Amino acid sequence: MASPEPKRQKTSAPLIGTHNGHFHADEALAVYLLRLLPTYTGSPLIRTRDPALLSTCHTVVDVGGEYNPSTQRFDHHQREFKTVFPGHTTKLSSAGLVYLHYGRAIISQHTSQPTDSPDVSLLYEKLYTDFIEPFDANDNGVPEYDPSVLASSNIKPRFVNRGFSLAAAVNRFNYAYPVPGLPEPEATDDAALDAQAAEDARFAHASTFVGTQFALELADKVAAWLPARAAVSAAFEDRTTHHPSGAIMVLKEGSPWADHLYSLEEAAAVKGQVLYVLFPEGAGPGSKWRIRAVGVEGEAFSNRKDLPDAWKGLRDEELSKVAGVPGAVFVHASGFIGGNASFEGALEMARKAVEI
């Protein structure tokens, strides 16, 4: 379905509507995303479930029982609703719906690139995967792991997490106790209006909170993640010059490389080939160098191949002696990273690690 073009009102910014009562992260984010667009800059918000009041709104999110982008209606609670983001299987929430239709425009505005440019397309997919989809899953009750598979695996947690997430943080703004930094609205003679005003203030605070996280994620992707792609692509093409197996990739500077490496490997049909990535600790010819074991995609604490067990936890001369490489600085006790005083030393350590 084509993305709708918001209608500009000459006299005032268009009115946004969502429901009142207990709020969730998805509509808090949806409202913030809309207000990032020039059309909705300064848009007022009404929170109600009254159909007559909602009918006066230009755009309605997370309420109303209708998904119709041509009339700017973005609810997802209908029984027949099954819309997903392209290439994904999680049903969208109001945040996902707004992002589906307006995400490219938001990114285009931030990057000053056309909405159909390759960079905008990369960011559009990346931001959905890394940031928006968890909101959709949370609001639709989709667990990160299949509960039956998790139960049968007999995996036990090592510590208590309490399920902290951005969605959980937003939910805290619903509670009755005072929110730090948020003054209570002035009381009037109407208790019901006072309660609604306080709830609306909490929603506005939550929307700014969660929206700021999106803005930071977008800024990081534009400033660091996207520029790194060209550097990682060049290093990936050059990998066999460092080891005939292609298992060692060398970056000229530190950058966010993992996501790009995974996609480049997949495109080249050599998934899992690169075992170690080398990069300098800082700028300048005298910089020390790091050796990073490539993680298993989708697993935070597993590597394709750790640095050798015999090196783990050793430092300096002891490590140089055991590894047989001068200039060794350290290898972490878990084997995921190590260092050497020079590029040549780091490369030799990586070559030995590949062959052990």
Image (cartoon, rainbow, N blue to C red):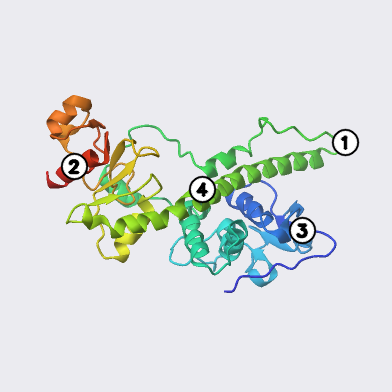
Q: Amino acid at mark 2?
A: Glu
The mark that comes first in sequence, 2 or 3, is 3
Which residue does the image show at 68% across and 70% down from the upper left? 5
SS of the residue under disc 4: helix
Q: Position of residue 269 (x, y in %)?
A: 26, 65
Image: 39 above or below 300: below
Q: Quadrant of the N terminus?
A: bottom right
Secondary structure state at the residue bearing disc 1: loop
Mark 4 nearby-residue class (10 Å; few <14, some 14–19, many ≥20): few
The amino acid type of the residue labelled 4 equals: Asp
Amino acid type, callout 1: Asp
Q: Are marks 2 and 1 in contact (CB under 8 Å)?
A: no
Read off the residue under disc 4: 220
Give the distance between the C-alpha atoms of the residues marked 2 and 3, in whole angstroms.
63 Å
> Residue 322's x, y, as percent?
13, 30
**Quadrant location of residue 78?**
bottom right
Q: Nearer the viewer, mark 1 or mark 3?
A: 3
Precedes in sequence: disc 4 or disc 2: 4
Quadrant (top left, top right, bottom left, bottom right) of the C terminus: top left
Gap between marks 1 and 4, in whole Å?
Answer: 47 Å
**Which residue is under mark 1?**
189
Mark found first going from the N terminus, 2 or 1: 1
Q: Residue furthest front?
A: 285
Q: How far is disc 3 from disc 4 in space, using C-alphas? A: 31 Å
Q: Nearer the viewer, residue 287 or 39?
A: 287
Check the image and report above or below for 265 versus 280.
Answer: below
How far is mark 2 from mark 1, CA to CA? 77 Å
Residue 328 seen by the camera: yes
Identify the residue position indicated by label 3 in the image: 15
The one of 290 and 334 positioned closer to us in this rendering: 290
Q: Which mark is residue 348?
A: 2
